[in-house]
Amino acid sequence: MKKLNVALAILVAAVMAANAEPVYSDVVGYQKGTVINSGYTALGLSMVKAPIVTANVASKVGSKITLSQSLGTVDAAKPYYLEVVSGSLAGERADVTVVSSSAEVTIIPSSRNTSDLSGLANEDIVVLRRHIILRDLDGMISPALVGNDDSNLCDRVLVFNNGFIVYNKASDNDYYQDGDLDPAADTLIIPPGAGVMIHRRSSSPTTVTEVGTVRNNKFARPYAQGYQFIAPAYPSGISPNNLKADTSSGWNASDRILPFNNGFVSYVFEPTDTTGGANGTWYQDGDLDSANGTTIIQANAAAFIYKHAADAGIVENSPITN
């Protein structure tokens, strides 16, 4: 298998200040990689959709948030989420519903929420984004994934939710959960910071080109107990050091990082070994060289993390606006 080759082009970058509040222009980029011929590829989608609006919080009553400016015309049927840019909750996010041509969003319960945003304060800056969905993959992959009503012949996308759930691409070019032809799963949300697996049946290569906005705010990454299939929140690779994966953050010898490279490769943590750092050392299983500072999750790839216990995780800084 060829490892995904990463090419990131930053087209526009600027930082401006106005009214004593930081206002960041959108940074647009792309990254490109070749999907494996007739096999599996772990894919991370680190770009985000352009903001619907970036605004201050004008008020918050319960789950309803009023922003300092209108959302404009939006399709309320689409899935959205709010990310906090400033204040004590910077990096946290929650799914929301929207009202077109209003300034209101409403937080809704979701397993993707990192916070209930109860501590959100007036004047905190937030950004509203639309979620990436399964159907969006079609605009990134060329030649297209192969649709076929025979589940043994179609290309497939595997989404992790306490185990991989398989979505087959059918002859009508819709996606369906394996074994189920109704309803179509095209609107399935690919959560921020999560990866998917592409199962390519065809022997011909296809290329994934992700074009979008580089997130310019912090990103909260909490950990559940057990396995989670993560991807970079920004178009840059991840090392154990980037994840603060050490004893100071509660990692121990039972935790693992498993990037995909023609199969999952296990990295193990030795909490009492100070070779790679005072708070423990990471090794590729069977290797004697420290991997603490090694990029083991590429910018457009994904990996399993196994955590022995749930914890608050970390808040990552954007490489654009540290």
Image (cartoon, rainbow, N blue to C red):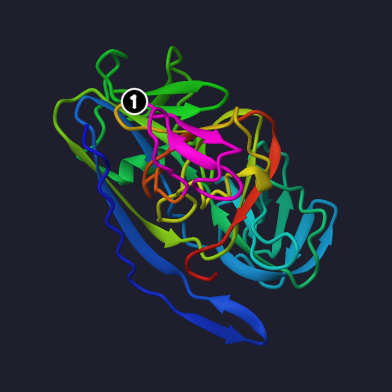
* Residue 35 position within the rendered picture, expressed as x and y whole percent measured from the top left: 25, 37
Q: Is residue 19 left or right of residue 306?
A: right
Q: Is 137 above or below relative to 72?
A: above
Q: Is 274 above or below relative to 21?
A: above
Q: Is 140 above or below relative to 175?
A: below
Q: Any magenta on residue 269?
A: yes
Q: Any magenta on residue 72?
A: no
* Residue 61 position within the rendered picture, expressed as x and y whole percent measured from the top left: 85, 58
Q: Mark 1 points at which residue?
A: 263
The residue closer to the viewer here, 225 or 291, is 291
**Quadrant of the image for the N terminus?**
top left
Which residue is farthest right? Answer: 61
Query: Which range of residues does the magenta coloring cover?
Result: 264-292
**Quadrant of the image for the C terminus?**
bottom right
The residue closer to the viewer here, 249 or 131, is 249
- Name the residue at 40% across, 43% down: 296
Q: Can residue 175 be seen in the rendering of this structure?
A: yes
* Residue 230 position within the rendered picture, expressed as x and y whole percent measured from the top left: 50, 39
- In the rendered structure, which amino acid carries the disc numbered 1? Gly
* Residue 10 position within the rendered picture, expressed as x and y whole percent measured from the top left: 34, 68
- Name the residue at 50% across, 80% down: 15
